[in-house]
Amino acid sequence: MTTLDQRCLAIVALTEIETLQEHILSEFSSLCAAQSGALWVSGERVGMRLRAWRGMLDRAALPDLVDPSLVQSSAWKADTSLLVPLMASSGELMALVQLSDPLSGTFSDELLADCEAFGRFAAEALKTATRFAQLQRQGLRDRETGAYTLSYFTDYATKEIYKARRYGRAFSLLTFSLDNLAGIRQRVGHAAVRQAQQIVLRVISQIIRDSDVVARATEQEFHVLLPETDYFGGLMFLRRALSSVIEETDAKALEARVPMGLTGGVATFPRDGDDFDELLVCCRRRMDERRGSLHHHLRLEPLPFWDEVELLLGNSRSPRLPDASGEPSRRGKVADVLFEELQGEIGREFLREPMARGLLYVGGPAVKGDLPIVRSLDHAPADFAPRVYVLGRHADLQEHHAMTPVFLEGDERLARHEFLLWMGDGSAYALLQRRGRGATWGFHTSDPTLVEGLVSKLQTAYDLQPY
């Protein structure tokens, strides 16, 4: 049998973080004759994240994050499980191991001392491996921008694909492009080109997590890898990154001289591709879709929410909409019942997949209990994942377990208009309508970029939570 000393010596010799995490869990399972186990490791800005598991555990029942404040400082038994905190000599909590399904039927009290001793070595090994990874990264940064090199990024992505396949996880790849780099160089010089690159990287670096990686691919293109992030999470990050760059002081000053032309696209493993190249192709295709969006064609970015609504619905100043085949946006008369029927259908779709994340805004004259979306979600489960907001004047609905009423008293624009804005995992839709005598006039679209823009402006107009 492997002695405790041999286990400790073997563990401190490992410096590759992924290999080390797997080896720690394997050695703990062997030490305790446990058939199942899980490992959560510190390193994120919030909590400890699940990094490895094995055996007969139900993955769906394991929390992705563990709050360090809930972890005891010494090993303990809970029901049929043995839990071991990995504490470094500095007192820092590095990880938590959970062991279960012992071959003998129970974990003996004598195991606690051995687990704590091995845990101290494992904690120091994790601390060393984390530091080693940080030093490796520092030597793989682009000199001009501080971003990681493309070679490091692709190697990191390859490892992430391996982990995602093995553990059934998702991750998202984002690509950002400074489309007007040639114009910046021509009009204000190379120093401004470098400034634009540094602005984008600085802003993105401020909002990423410890495990996220940013790399420079070409002069105008950057990649971001978000481990354990689904498509909706990647889309929310993209929205946050683009809006954060727009609001940055140096970016505003540069935009006043010449547009940067920043655009982005997101793709998620495995839904959008099975390898890095497929995901990258998908990102670039979605960037092209953004460039061709009506949002950019009509230059809607500077308009506030209600001005954009009026322009899209149509007035004397509104441009004609493209009518090419495949155009996802239409304007004209709509059925009086469309608004209600769409609410009911979306509600039914929510209940078919209550754990699928999404964001829905329903606005109209009054927040009432008989709205189709309200009735549809009366039986939504407690762990209902989509976020639903209903906006309007307060009527007879005070609160609801599956949605958030937003009471807006005295806003006459809501008295004259109704809207439905939906963003989900790979789908987007908006309906804007104005009821009149004898007819309802509407605009509807499945253009994701246009829907995102409307959602962002609605959130700004009414101080709603942006992400």
Image: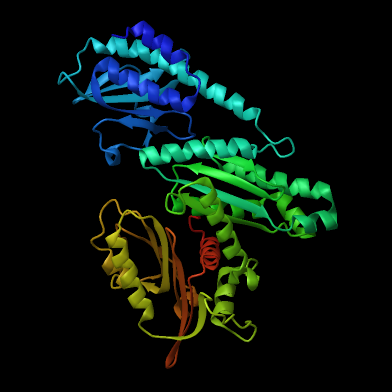
* Residue that appears at 51% across and 43% down: 226
Residue 90 appears in the picture as rendered: yes
The residue lying furthest to the left in this view is: 105
Q: Is residue 240 left or right of residue 358?
A: right
The spot of residue 397 in percent (x, y) is 31, 67
Give the colouring mode of the picture: rainbow
Q: Measuring from the top left, give residue 81's x and y in whole percent.
A: 23, 25
57 relative position to 283: left or right: left
Q: Along the line of sight, which residue is nearer the eye, 3 or 419?
A: 3
At horizontal 33% and vertical 31% (from top left) the residue drawn is 53
Residue drawn where x is 44% and y is 42% of the image: 228
In this rendering, is residue 160 above or below 74? below
- The percent position of residue 260, horizontal first and vertical second, equals 72, 56
Residue toward you, 371 or 182: 182
Q: Is 78 above or below relative to 266?
A: above
Across and down, in percent, residue 24 comes to: 38, 21
Q: Quadrant of residue 97?
A: top left
Residue 397 seen in render = no
Count of number-bearing discs: 0
Of 56 and 443, the residue lying toward us: 56
Q: Residue 334 lies in what quarter of the image?
A: bottom left
Q: Is residue 82 left or right of residue 158?
A: left
Q: Quadrant of the N terminus?
A: top left
Q: Residue at x 62, y 37 (%)?
A: 151
